[in-house]
Amino acid sequence: MFVVFFIKLRQTRVAGWATWKIIEISKKENRIILTKNRKLLKFKEVTHAIFVRPGTIGEQIKRIIDYLDIKYSIKPFSGRP
């Protein structure tokens, strides 16, 4: 099961403290980073990340679900597994 970790890099600085903390958490907890910032993808410490392309939120979510092939794993409003 994939656990997705979403960040807004507008609120963090690339190569700043928060960015390194996000990278550390994603490695430690085996999370995938979803980002709109290509600079984050260039860090060698980032092992699992997905670039979120421009579009509406619905389009972005659909692309991510299709990319991760988790369409049938999603259970909306079911609470935590």
Image (tube, helix red, strand yellow):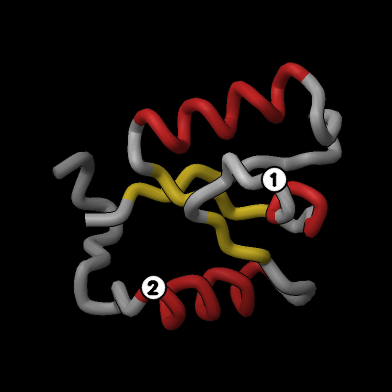
Camera-near label (2 vs 1) is 1
Please rate how many residues cluster around mark 2, counting C-alpha atoms within 10 Å: few if below 14, some from 14 to 19, many from 20. few
Along the viewing direction, whichever of 51 and 11 lies nearer the viewer: 51
Residue position for label 2? 68
Which amino acid, mark 2?
Leu
Q: Are marks 2 and 1 in contact (CB under 8 Å)?
A: no
Could you tell whether 65 is left or right of 13 in the image? left
Task: Label 1: state its secondary structure.
Answer: loop
Q: Residue at x 62, y 72 (%)?
A: 60
Q: Residue at x 80, y 30 (%)?
A: 15
Residue 25 point in image, percent of width and height:
47, 28
Residue 46 point in image, percent of width and height:
57, 46
Residue 11 point in image, percent of width and height:
81, 31
Q: Which disc number belongs to residue 14?
A: none
Farthest left residue in view: 81
Q: Residue at x 30, y 73 (%)?
A: 70
Residue position for label 1? 43
**Res 80 → quadrant:** top left
Task: Label 2: state its secondary structure.
Answer: helix
Residue 41 point in image, percent of width and height:
69, 55
Q: Quadrant of the N terminus?
A: bottom left
In the displayed structure, 81 sits above or below 66; it is above
Which amino acid, mark 1?
Phe
Please rate how many residues cluster around mark 1, counting C-alpha atoms within 10 Å: few if below 14, some from 14 to 19, many from 20. few
Could you tell whether 76 is left or right of 11 in the image? left
